[in-house]
Image (tube, rainbow, N blue to C red):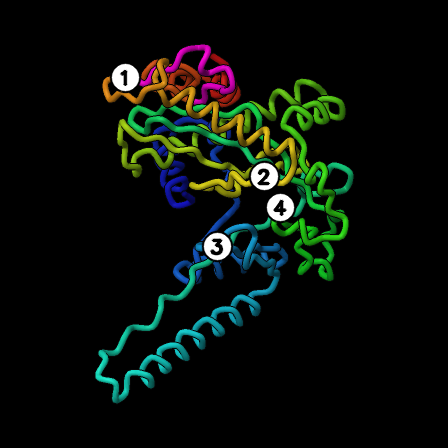
Amino acid sequence: MVKNIKRYKREQDKERETRERSQFNLEFVPVTFVLPADYNLFAEEYRRCPTCTWIMKPCGRSQGSGIFLVTKLSRIKKWSNEGNSASTYGRHAVQASSVGSGNPQQPAPPRESYVISKYIESPLLIGGKKFDLRLYVLVTSFRPIRAYLFRRGFCRFCSAKYDRSTHQMDNMLVHLTNVAIQKQGDDYNPHHGGKWSVEDLLFYVASHRGSDAAELLWQEICWVIGHSLKAVAPMMLSDPHCFECYGYDIIIDANLKPWLIEVNASPSLSTTTNTDHFLKLSLIDAILNVVLPPDGVPNAKWNKRPSADALRGWIVLIDEEAKVGSAYARQNKGSKAKSSRSDIGRSK
């Protein structure tokens, strides 16, 4: 995803060489690298900002497993050396076990890749606690793009108050919002699961920063999701008989800027509270209303145009074919970023 967004940004910048870059700012993903492949690029970026905090996430795991924070390049080198030692040990073990057995030597298992991103050190806090948003996006086509945003997203809160000090760097109850992590804390509340609805969040922002700020924040979030889909669309296989539901994780910083942290291709539908149970069932029901014809029977000849009634639980993010809810139509007319961002996510 990050590589495609970087490519997309370069392409958009080339198309807008004569305009001010601030009119089309695509900096909505933290600086990110894949280790060990991008280690030299990461080390160069680290030297530009040696006081920054970075967060490392294993590519092949979920639910917060294996994530840790780093501030020193020496820790990355230690991690790298430990990985090399493990690979070497595994290779020697395979060689030893194959001696005299007649079995051909097997290659050592590939080393686990990690994504390392610049940590958002000044997140928006509510009650002194960090949180992120989980939003569900249904994509029924990538060529042309047709995507919908589920209205009932939610916020996931940490159970411990946010603390940037170094002695709390290894306390994942402070830094990670994953339910699997937070359930291990003594302050976790099993009744509400440490979750807010998106409506509650926007109401909070409106009451503390003003209704215009809350409206702009939501427009920015829709804008980020919309352009992330545009960035990856050329690389996606487009099967007219398939659909995807993605789980978007977004963090809002203290300046109300949304940052795209992760996109989950298979978001968890497990539940921890009654509210959570109702939300996930509503999501499944809403998806079926959109992807199935009105009579509920799959039909390859159906034009995949859901009725207004079927879209009641959704916001139209992008519909390139109908030119509804998308940013590109307004951008082609030369509108500025604020106007184009407000066009993404317009209700149908």
Which callout, 2 or 3, points to the residue nearer the camera? 2
Q: Which residue is mark 4?
A: 179
Q: Which residue is mark 2?
A: 271
Q: Are marks 2 and 3 in contact (CB under 8 Å)?
A: no
Looking at the image, is 124 positioned above or below residue 174?
above
Q: How many marks?
A: 4
Q: Which range of residues does the magenta coloring cover?
A: 304-317
Most foreground residue, 206 or 171: 171
Q: Which residue is mark 3?
A: 61
Q: Which mark is residue 97?
A: none
Identity, as a three-letter code, of the amino acid under mark 2: Thr
Residue 287 place in picture, x, y as percent: 44, 25
Q: What residue do we see at 39% from left, 21% from top? A: 328
Q: Earlier in the sequence, mark 2 or mark 1?
A: 2
Q: What residue do we see at 23% from left, 18% from top? A: 301
Side (left or right) of 103 relative to 36? left
Identity, as a three-letter code, of the amino acid under mark 3: Arg
Q: Does 305 lie within the magenta span?
A: yes
Q: CA distance from mark 2 to mark 1?
A: 33 Å
Q: CA distance from mark 2 to mark 3?
A: 19 Å
Residue 271 place in picture, x, y as percent: 58, 39
Q: Main secondary structure of the magenta part?
A: loop
Most foreground residue, 345 or 210: 345
